[in-house]
Image (spheres, rainbow, N blue to C red):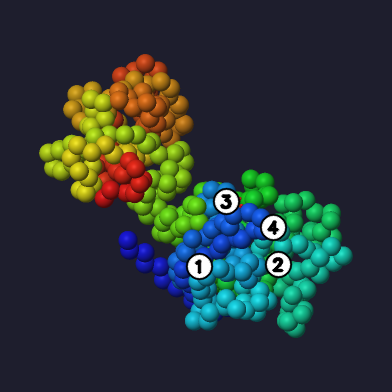
Amino acid sequence: MSTAVTSRATGSGVAPQRLVLNKLRKIYASRGRESFEAVKSIDLEIAPGELIALLGPSGCGKTTTLRMIAGLETVTSGEILIGERSVGDLPPGKRNVGVGFESYALYPPLTVRENLAYGLRARKVADADARVDEIAKRLDMTELLDQRPAGLSSGQKQRVALARALIRKPPVLLLDEPLGHLDASARQRVRRELKLLQREFGYTTIVVTHDQLEALSLADRMAVMDAGVIQQFGTPDEVFDDPANRFVAEFVGEPAINMFAGEVVRADGGLAVRVGDGVLETAAVDARLGDTVMVGLRPQDTQVLGDDATGGLGGAVINFEDLLEFGQASVRVRGVEQPLLVQTPPEVDWRPGDTVRFGARPDRVHLFDSRSGERIR
Ligand SMILES: Nc1ncnc2c1ncn2[C@@H]1O[C@H](COP(=O)(O)OP(=O)(O)OP(=O)(O)O)[C@@H](O)[C@H]1O
């Protein structure tokens, strides 16, 4: 897979640094309980100034990975490099990493302004006050500066935590669900500002999130994680259009990809899958004739076919929603247990009970091994 990501030079801040994880592993050994491998030897290379999203279901090891990079959790084995320097043996304060974690408490006796300025003053930064004012303005929180943490809502606390991470202009920035507590409109605004600040200052950034939209809108590349393993690392388009395995195909994408069984058969130009009495051509070449495979077809990739078409899948419409820019239909297809979701162009107006046909471009018909879930290319 080609992932050309160029490093970004910035005029106004830190020198961007690459961040490399080499076979990073974490086993939690709890007394009286079996040990648990939360992170299973992951490799990741993040370009200087790049923003990546670490995306995955709850418990997959995202937070553990961030905490190891920050030095808040011990590493069982493996290596963490910032620039050329291995930082695994350095205490958190010496790693030059900014963290915005929910659990990272603010100092209760200090005002928000004092909380933000604290680290800067300790490092004798001359323009600490000006920096506080600037970041507060950018994150739309000037009115919070004179308050104390106890009086803040969870969304406000989150903004302060984000500001505190950003204000130091660290070469590496780690953010764990940084926008989780914000309401919808604040979330959009802060997300936009976060991205602008990140571009401006060139922090090499990892944002942990379980929100796909957040990952898609923020990230240069996404690392999709499950069960302690990075399942795929690529641009949002690569991950969406070319999923490495069934987990990634099903985890990424809204609405979810259609997944159903089909039999590999020969088609005019190559291979196809037979599903009931329908046939979908595929660009995959490594499937064995006669095998049953799982077929992944995104609703967005379906193409409506005319009544006289021979290929494709046929079925009966169960439900149709007109969403203005496109329509969305649930279609009962012969040979498939669950209804399939089909996205239709705006001019299509289907009714429940209509008999319809649809297909897809062969390169959009993804095949997966029915046992391992690995992609068949
Ligand atoms: N201190 C610990 N001792 C034992 N197991 C732990 C410890 N911390 C985390 N785990 C386990 O390690 C796994 C990974 O946890 P982690 O918090 O890294 O996941 P996550 O992907 O960040 O999930 P979430 O989105 O819910 O925060 C989970 O199964 C969790 O129960």
Looking at the image, is mark 4 or mark 2 nearer the viewer?
4
Q: Are marks 4 and 2 in contact (CB under 8 Å)?
A: no
Q: Amino acid at mark 3?
A: Gly
Q: Residue at image x 78%, y 73%?
A: 118
Q: Which dot marks residue 102?
A: 4
Q: Amino acid at mark 4?
A: Glu
Q: Which dot marks residue 335?
A: none
Asked whether, in this view, residue 66 is left or right of residue 283, the answer is right
Q: Amino acid at mark 1?
A: Leu
Report the residue marked by disc 3.
59
Q: Compare residues 177 and 38 and report the one nearer the observer.
A: 38
Q: Sequence order check: which comes first, mark 2 or mark 3?
A: 3
Q: Residue at image x 34%, y 20%?
A: 316
Q: Compare residues 306 and 347 and report the one nearer the observer.
A: 306
Q: Residue at image x 48%, y 52%?
A: 226
Vertical comparison of 25 with 356: above or below: below
Q: Which dot marks residue 24?
A: 1
Report the residue marked by disc 2.
164
Percent across and percent down for residue 281 are 21, 38
Q: CA distance from mark 4 to mark 1?
A: 23 Å
Residue 284 visible, this orientation: yes
Q: Residues within 10 Å of mark 4 (few under 14, many from 20)?
A: some
Vertical comparison of 342 with 171: above or below: above
